């Protein structure tokens, strides 16, 4: 069964304190790994897609990386507006339509 | 370009009633997926529609159903509501041209359903 786990469950950082969020997955035939940001009461906002081990994507203070078993979302010098829940999802399997989401990491950045 | 829209944004129903939620995808997107999000279970896949056909289904009871129209708009129906159906229901769309599947999903704001 395809599974996605994320750690830590919650993370509190001071403004400017860099850190990383982890997404570990067990899937048969990875077709893509996705990162989303979700603010309270809103739908997830698409951030990145990664397709193969070694791939990296960057956007402002965020950088996503992918290995064969996990992905990291690195946050450099975070600001309070980066506070949100970060979700990881994988698309896997022969049909490729099914997306499995992790439970998310709730990030709080304090000024 | 307008994003994914969902209506209504909030709903309050009582046990045993049924409810219909609506989703309009991003223009040009032909695939629509539905998800249920709860604090305890996170985001769970309900089903995906493409060209008016259900292409994939998650592990939910038959009370949950959906359909897609020729303009790619989709509706989701839940019959005989239970207290545990209270959740944020999210719709996501992605482009799916002939022979090519673009994987990035874009989500709507969700419909918050409360069952009393």
Image (cartoon, rainbow, N blue to C red):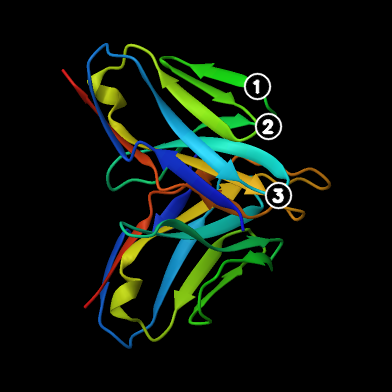
Q: Are marks 2 and 1 in contact (CB under 8 Å)?
A: yes
Neighbor class of circle 2 (other Cα within 10 Å; few <14, some 14-19, many 20+) is some
Pinpoint the chain carrying mark 2.
Answer: A
Between marks 1 and 3 in the image, the one whose residue lies nearer the viewer? 3
- Name which residue lies at 38% across and 13% down: A76
Per the image, label 2 sits on a secondary structure element best described as loop
Per the image, label 3 sits on a secondary structure element best described as loop
Q: Are marks 1 and 3 on the same chain?
A: yes
Neighbor class of circle 1 (other Cα within 10 Å; few <14, some 14-19, many 20+) is few
Pinpoint the chain carrying mark 3.
Answer: A
The image position of residue B73, as x and y in percent, is 57, 60
Location of mark 3 (residue): A28
Which numbered disc flags the more N-terminal residue, 1 or 3? Answer: 3
Location of mark 1 (residue): A55
Q: Distance between the residues labelled 2 and 1?
A: 7 Å
Nearer to us in this view, B64 or B61: B61
Would residue B22 be visible to someone looking at this image? yes
Per the image, label 1 sits on a secondary structure element best described as loop
Pinpoint the chain carrying mark 1.
Answer: A
Q: How far apart are marks 3 and 2 (CA)?
A: 14 Å
């Amino acid at each position: 069964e395809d599974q996605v786990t994320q750690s830590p469950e919650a993370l509190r950082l001071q403004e400017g304190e860099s850190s990383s969020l982890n997404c570990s997955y067990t899937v048969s035939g990875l077709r893509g790994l996705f990162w989303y940001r979700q603010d309270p009461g809103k739908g997830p906002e698409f951030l990145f897609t990664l397709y193969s081990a070694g791939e990296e994507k960057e956007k402002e203070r965020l950088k996503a990386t992918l290995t064969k078993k996990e992905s990291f979302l690195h946050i450099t010098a975070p600001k309070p507006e980066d506070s949100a829940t970060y979700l990881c999802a994988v698309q896997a399997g022969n049909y490729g339509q099914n997306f499995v989401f992790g439970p998310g990491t709730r990030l709080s950045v304090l000024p | 370009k307008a994003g994914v829209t969902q209506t209504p944004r909030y709903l309050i129903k009582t046990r045993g009633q049924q409810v219909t939620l609506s989703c309009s995808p991003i223009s040009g997107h032909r695939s629509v997926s539905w998800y249920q999000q709860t604090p305890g279970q996170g985001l769970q896949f309900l089903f995906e529609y493409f060209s008016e056909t259900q292409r994939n289904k998650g592990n939910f009871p038959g009370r949950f159903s959906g359909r897609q129209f020729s303009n790619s708009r989709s509706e989701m129906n839940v019959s005989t509501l239970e207290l545990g159906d209270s959740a944020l229901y999210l719709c996501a769309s992605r482009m799916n041209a002939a022979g090519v599947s673009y994987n990035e999903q874009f989500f709507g704001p969700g419909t918050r359903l409360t069952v009393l």
